[in-house]
Amino acid sequence: MASPPPSPEPDWAGLPDDALLTVFERLGAPEVLMGAGVVCRNWLRVATGEPDLWRRVDLSDCFDPTIDMVAMACAAVDRADGRLEHFAADCFVTDALLFYMAKR
């Protein structure tokens, strides 16, 4: 008896934008900034082109001394495109970062 052909692998790059947004919202800012948002061009487009995704940014539990956390925070603020409503972070917040956020 012949076995059935293997199922095709899912095309994760082809997920609709609304599905990606739902996934990214559940992941949170750190995970999108450090990985999920750069899986492929389509995912990067959604991660950088949807300001509402970045209205709430919580970096409070992701401090890593090997990562430029200020640059990560600035990237999230930039992606919010003036729609940032909530920002949470510990350890790495400086006056310069707060000033940058206020200007945006």
Image: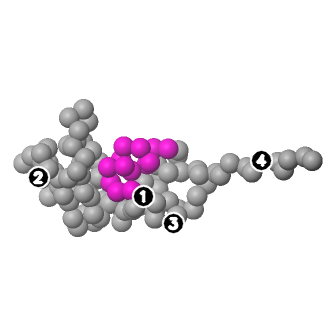
Decide if residue 24 is on the left or right side of residue 74. Answer: right
Amino acid at circle 3: Asp
Instruction: Judge depth for marks 3 and 4 and give the one in front.
Output: 4
- Residue designated by label 3: 18
Amino acid at circle 4: Pro
Which image quadrant is residue 77 in?
A: bottom left
Instruction: Judge depth for marks 4 and 1 and give the one in front.
Output: 4
User: Mark 2: which secondary structure?
Assistant: helix
Secondary structure predominantly adopted by residues drawn in magenta: helix
- Residue at 77 percent across and 47 percent down: it is 6
- Tell me where residue 23 appears, x and y as whole percent: 46, 60
The residue at the far top in this view is: 66
User: Mark 4: which secondary structure?
Assistant: loop
Assess disc 1: are there few (<14), some (14-19) or many (≥20) residues with their C-alpha within 10 Å of its C-alpha. many
- Residue designated by label 4: 6
Q: Are marks 4 and 1 in contact (CB under 8 Å)?
A: no
**Quadrant of the drawing holding the C terminus:** bottom left
Instruction: Judge depth for marks 1 and 2 and give the one in front.
Output: 1
92 within the magenta span:
no
Q: CA distance from mark 3 to mark 2?
A: 33 Å
Q: Tell me, for residue 32, which label it has, or none.
A: none
38 within the magenta span:
yes
Q: CA distance from mark 3 to mark 4?
A: 28 Å
- Residue designated by label 1: 24
Amino acid at circle 2: Phe
Bounds of the magenta segment: 27-39
